[in-house]
């Protein structure tokens, strides 16, 4: 069977408590990068990777997979609530981890929903089905569910691609507000969104990291002409 390189020579650092956006056209390898970081790639045996992915100083392959996925959460483009109540969606991860007293769990659910800017909208219906929430609310529910297991890094793969502008703004606000607590990796096909929220931006094209830098630099003075073409909308 032939081999195909999906990502090549990628070398990047993500500093704690920053928002890093990963931008680039479709099929440039953005999703694959996230899947390498949290080892989802291992679910497909035909994938191979070389090099190191370090979380602090630990190669992710040396970490227990459940611990890794708790420390590094991943949120997808389409929110996937569990069938069940809003409360149970948030409590699911913590219940797997530890035994909590009832009040502790209620506090954790409230804290998580508040952090994701969802509490006020759902506090009176925690025992109703999560599937009845709007798309924007479901996406914030997924963020709250991630927060509930106390992650360090939250990665999101085009989290607002299916959302209206108000829901999108709520998620961007949550990211900014929570930067002191978490490190964010945001894959987005929306360069304006990357410009609004990021500290740093990494531009990928055909599996290569073309350029990474401060957001202002990438959008106003890109060094590589290919970055310029992409951020100015000439290619996409
Ligand atoms: N499961 C897979 N099997 C084979 N090729 C894949 C698979 N997933 C992704 N690819 C290929 O890898 C490349 C990068 O894909 P992806 O990481 O999804 O890009 P992006 O998220 O930037 O759109 C694409 O050319 C895609 O076809
Ligand atoms: Mg993708």
Image (cartoon, grey):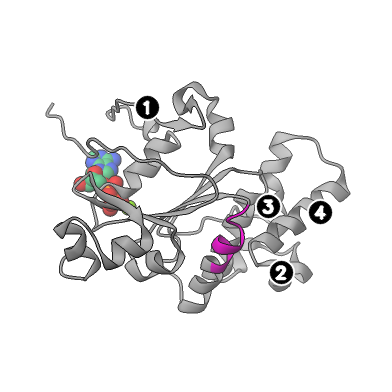
Question: In the image, is the residue at mark 4 within 8 Å of ligand 2 by its beta carbon?
Answer: no
Of callouts 3 and 4, the N-terminal one:
3
Relative horizontal placement of residue 136, taking residue 36 as reference (left or right): right
Relative horizontal placement of residue 212, taking residue 107 as reference (left or right): left
Where is mark 4, residue-wise? Answer: 107
Relative horizontal placement of residue 76, taking residue 227 as reference (left or right): right
Ligand 1's quadrant: top left
Q: Is residue 160 above or below residue 183?
A: below
Q: Looking at the rendered structure, which numbered label has been put on residue 122?
A: 2
How much space separates mark 2 and mark 4, taking CA atoms?
Answer: 14 Å
**Neighbours of disc 4 within 10 Å: few (<14), some (14-19), many (20+):** few
Q: Which residues are magenta?
A: 173-180
Of callouts 1 and 4, the N-terminal one:
1
Judge by depth and name the residue closer to the eye, 108 or 131. 108
How much space separates mark 3 and mark 4, taking CA atoms?
Answer: 11 Å
Judge by depth and name the residue closer to the eye, 149 or 60. 60
The answer to whether residue 236 is visible is: no
How much space separates mark 1 and mark 4, taking CA atoms?
Answer: 38 Å
**Neighbours of disc 2 within 10 Å: few (<14), some (14-19), many (20+):** some
Q: Is residue 121 above or below residue 142?
A: below
Q: Is residue 174 magenta?
A: yes
Q: Looking at the rendered structure, which numbered label has been put on residue 90?
A: 3
The number of discs equals: 4
Where is mark 1, residue-wise? Answer: 52
Q: Are marks 1 and 4 in contact (CB under 8 Å)?
A: no
Which secondary structure, mark 3? helix
Of callouts 2 and 4, the N-terminal one:
4
Of callouts 1 and 2, the N-terminal one:
1
């Amino acid at each position: 069977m032939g081999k195909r390189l999906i990502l090549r020579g990628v070398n990047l650092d993500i500093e704690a408590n920053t928002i890093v956006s990963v931008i680039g056209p479709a099929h440039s390898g953005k999703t694959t990068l996230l899947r390498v970081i949290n080892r989802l790639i291992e679910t497909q045996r035909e994938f191979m990777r070389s090099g190191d992915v370090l979380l602090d100083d630990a190669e992710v392959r040396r970490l227990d997979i459940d611990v890794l996925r708790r420390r590094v959460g991943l949120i997808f483009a389409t929110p996937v609530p569990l069938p069940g109540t809003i409360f149970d969606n948030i409590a699911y991860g913590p219940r797997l981890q530890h035994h909590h007293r009832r009040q502790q769990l209620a506090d954790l659910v409230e804290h998580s929903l508040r952090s994701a800017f969802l509490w006020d909208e759902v506090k009176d219906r925690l025992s109703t089905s999560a599937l009845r929430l709007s798309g924007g609310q479901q996406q914030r529910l997924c963020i709250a569910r991630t927060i509930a297991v106390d992650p360090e890094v939250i990665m999101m793969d085009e989290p607002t691609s299916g959302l209206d502008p108000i829901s999108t703004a709520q998620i961007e606000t949550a990211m900014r507000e929570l930067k002191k607590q978490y490190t964010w990796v945001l894959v987005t096909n929306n360069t304006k969104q990357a410009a609004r929220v990021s500290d740093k931006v990494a531009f990928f094209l055909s599996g290569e990291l073309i350029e990474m830098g401060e957001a202002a630099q990438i959008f106003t003075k890109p060094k590589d002409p290919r970055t310029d073409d992409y951020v100015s909308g000439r290619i996409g």
